[in-house]
Amino acid sequence: MTDSIFSSKSILSRRTVLKGAAAAATLLASPMVLRAQSGGKIRLGAPFHRTGIGASYGRWYERTAVAALKLINEGGGINGMEVEMIVEDDGTDPKRGSEVVEKFATEYKVDAIFGHLFSHVVAAAGPRAGELKVPYLVCSEGHQLASGGLNRYTFQPGITDVKSQVSSMAPWVSQNLGKKAAMIFPDYAFGHDHRDYFSAAMKAAGGEVTTLIPIPPTESSFTRYLPQIPSDIDVLYHVMVGPAVLTFVKELGDHFGSQRPQIFGFMDSLEAVDLATPQLDYLDGTYFWEGNPRYAQKDQTEFDKFFREKVGVDANGASASDGKDISTYSHMFSVWETLFTIKKAMEAANYKSPEQKKDFILALEAIDKIEASNEHPQGDKVFNGKTHQVFGKQSISKVEGGKLNVVHTTSIEDGMYPDETDYTKQEL
């Protein structure tokens, strides 16, 4: 299925379109509305996970993209041209993901592709995007890009990678929850990043991971894996994805009963899951990584309020129209921020047609510091043009009374690591 999203048109001159990051932030905050002029279009391919194990993410990624593009088009589009989004379902499947990238490049002839999340899909689609020389901006967390495993056409500008996330948080886990850990993780690239980089970060922080428990990503029940958790650990580290996450956290509670170690999880294990679900009471007092706090905090920024309002998410992280429809709030901001990064780079390059893709790539690589704003509601970031990877802050939240309260926020520097590649040395 393919959908297109268009804005209204008017006869406004391109000279009325505000340019630059500061101007764009002002535009978003202003009640004045400018609309894209008639003429050319910017075409963006959006390979969302509408089906498969990533469907809950894909639904909210698409909803976030629709809201962001509505603002962009109402504000004059990009360089006065309206932005058209073409959606294809990749089924959260690597083969299909690669095929969709090829379809976007050869059939739709898009200016850029954005939106892939699951790392095993990115691992297949990224190389194809490089071969086809089409800009490919992922909303994923895999370390494959920053490690040099992809190409100059692939970028991750909206969300940090797993290596950065766990490197910044392992010292807190070691100091506050315990030195001896066991890990439960999905048995594919994303989970392997957690396995490798959390283990290394715990060791550097004076702790150790004693037990590794990989889970097939399509598993629907976990009772046969849970007895592998040693009884003498201080902390259990878990990250799970897919439609069976609620089953996972329920069965984890059944396994431990009233006796459990400290528990530190990635919000992936509870994305799109209501904390008020029966059998989740045992999570009270446990901790989670959050990329963007699901519950509006006491020190909530105006940028977070703006983002929630435009995407239609309430203070509890649920759909404003259905309190039981829980968003994937820790991840979906990456779609919003990626789209506004595309806008910023295309405007810097004065991009008007696919013949200027090289200029677009160079403009993306020139981005450095990113300030919190309506366009970047998750917070300040630093983009590394050599590795094509963004770095930002992480939140550690504690479950208290059925809600998640942030107890620690890392610095950007906590998650930075030495460059492992330099894509700017590759030919365009």
Image (cartoon, rainbow, N blue to C red):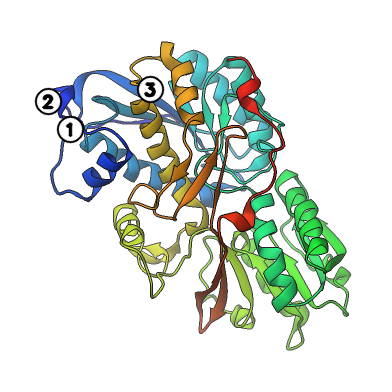
Residue 238 in picture, x, y percent from top left: 72, 65
Kindly report the distance in space between the C-alpha atoms of the residues bearing marks 2 and 1: 7 Å
Q: Above or below — where is 283 with respect to 294?
A: below
Which residue in the rendered view is the most extreme toward the left?
11
Mark closer to the chain start, 3 or 2: 2
* The quarter of the displayed image where residue 281 is located: bottom right
Residue assigned mark 3: 349
What amino acid is found at the position of numbered circle 2 in the picture? Leu
Q: Is residue 15 left or right of residue 415?
A: left
Residue 332: mark: none
Residue 410 in picture, x, y percent from top left: 57, 63
What amino acid is found at the position of numbered circle 1 in the picture? Arg
* The quarter of the displayed image where residue 343 is located: top left
Q: Are marks 2 and 1 in contact (CB under 8 Å)?
A: yes
Foreground: disc 1 or disc 3 = 3
Q: Above or below — where is 39 with respect to 148?
A: above
Q: Quadrant of the C terminus?
A: top right
Q: Is residue 248 visible?
A: yes
Dot 3: element: loop
Residue assigned mark 1: 35
Q: Residue at x 66, y 64 (%)?
A: 169
Residue 12: mark: 2
Which residue in the rendered view is the most extreme toward the bottom?
258
| Residue closer to the observer: 206 or 57 | 206
Dot 1: element: loop
